[in-house]
Amino acid sequence: MTRRVAVTGMAGVTALGSDWSSVRAAFADGRTGIRVMDEWSRYSGINTRLAAPVPDFSVDYPRKKTRTMGRVAQMAVSAVERALARAGLLDDPVVRGGRTGVAYGSSFGSPDSVLGFYELKKEGASRHLNATSYIQMMSHTAAVNIGLFFGVTGRIIPTSSACTSGSQAIGYAYEAIAWNKADVMIAGGAEELDITDTAVFDTLYATSTRNDSPATTPRPYDRDRDGLVIGEGAGALILEEYDHAQARGATILAEIVGFGCNSDGSHVTQPQAETMGQALRLALDDAGLAPEAIGIVSGHGTATDWGDIAETTATNAVLGPQAAIHSLKGHFGHSLGACGAIEAWLGIEMMRESWFCPTANLSTVDSRCAELDYVMGTPRQLDVGYLMSNNFAFGGINTSLIFRRV
């Protein structure tokens, strides 16, 4: 028999702030985190000049703690620290006791740490390599640094699956607790903004080039969308066995009740609506829910041409045309490995308030997108019992998480 899994802490680092009140205020005002990156003007081969950076981020940790951390790991640790504090577990012996683990992901480590290795290959010697270069570069740098910083001695599950890194980590953390491999799991994802991330999509002609009007893009599901905008940030959820949380008097913020994950198995960059839909059904089956139980969908909504069409087609096929859906990427851009964790955190916050922001910049739904109840224009009051949060990644990796309102 599987065990129930509660969410007892959550926090994040985003382009619109690092606490719910700041982010909610931005949502209510219709502000987004997208800006023109003037410092990218030297990259002549890149068409877009847009991104959603986290402004003024820094940490005040001892050098001994940060020497293995690049920016992505620093954002991850910062989010986890505040999530543990909210859960009432910061500095609690349970974190070091062997029954707490980490499931955390990013697409990559800190890109600048690669330069020393590149210099070595190109020049035959490097002035920039040091003992921590690889630790900052490796794709599991966030998971490892979280474990080191907080003294975690349980299992470490690194997820590096591009845009599903964060959501996949939350799902695997949920399964670890449900199947009695851990009592507490630190879960989430992070990503550091870098021109190389933007270049990946720019070479595919998948980035927005509205360089003169950053406030109008990206436009998830919109008829006039012209591509995605890369962002950065981190999100963290503290998952805990339900009875364990109740026994210590923890505030239960939500319950995670379903997780689905699969692969398209066909093309590395062309999403497939059929297998995306199967991931949603796997989550519903895991939760033991009928499709009509889902009150709202937090959609992936990258604002890419075929991605939005495939996603909405899958959502319509599984949940029906009446399903309410919004995407947060109009506000934050696409934060890659962080997006699934940030969207889960903020989705739960909105579910707790019965208040959901509209998809930024969505004014006219693309007729090629499937019929759904798109939340657009103004925030919506919705008293929902279950939130579904979906993410889809390069390589055809699909995830779906279902959270229950408590």
Image: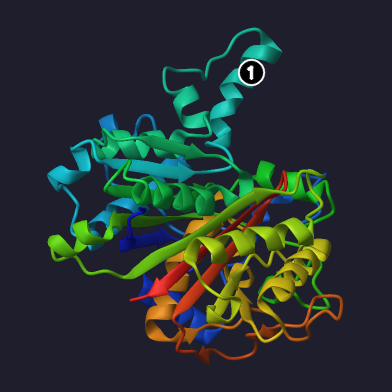
Q: Is residue 321 left or right of residue 380?
A: right
* Picture residue at 21% right of the left edge, 43% below the top: 95
Q: Name the foreground residue: 273 vs 188.
A: 273
The answer, for residue 63, to whether it is visible in the render is yes
Residue annotated with mark 1: 119
> What residue occupies the far top of the structure in this picture?
124
- Helix, strand or loop under label 1: helix
Which residue is outermost to the front? 1
**Amino acid type for the residue under numbered disc 1:** Glu
Q: Is residue 229 visible?
A: no
Please provide percent x and percent y for residue 175: 42, 49
**Residue located at (49% from left, 86% from top):** 28
How many dots with numbers? 1
Q: How is the image coloured?
A: rainbow
Q: Quadrant of the C terminus?
A: bottom left
Q: Residue at x 37, y 46 (%)?
A: 179
Is 265 located above or below residue 247 in the figure?
Answer: above
Residue at 64% over, 90% down: 377
The residue closer to the viewer here, 74 or 396, is: 396
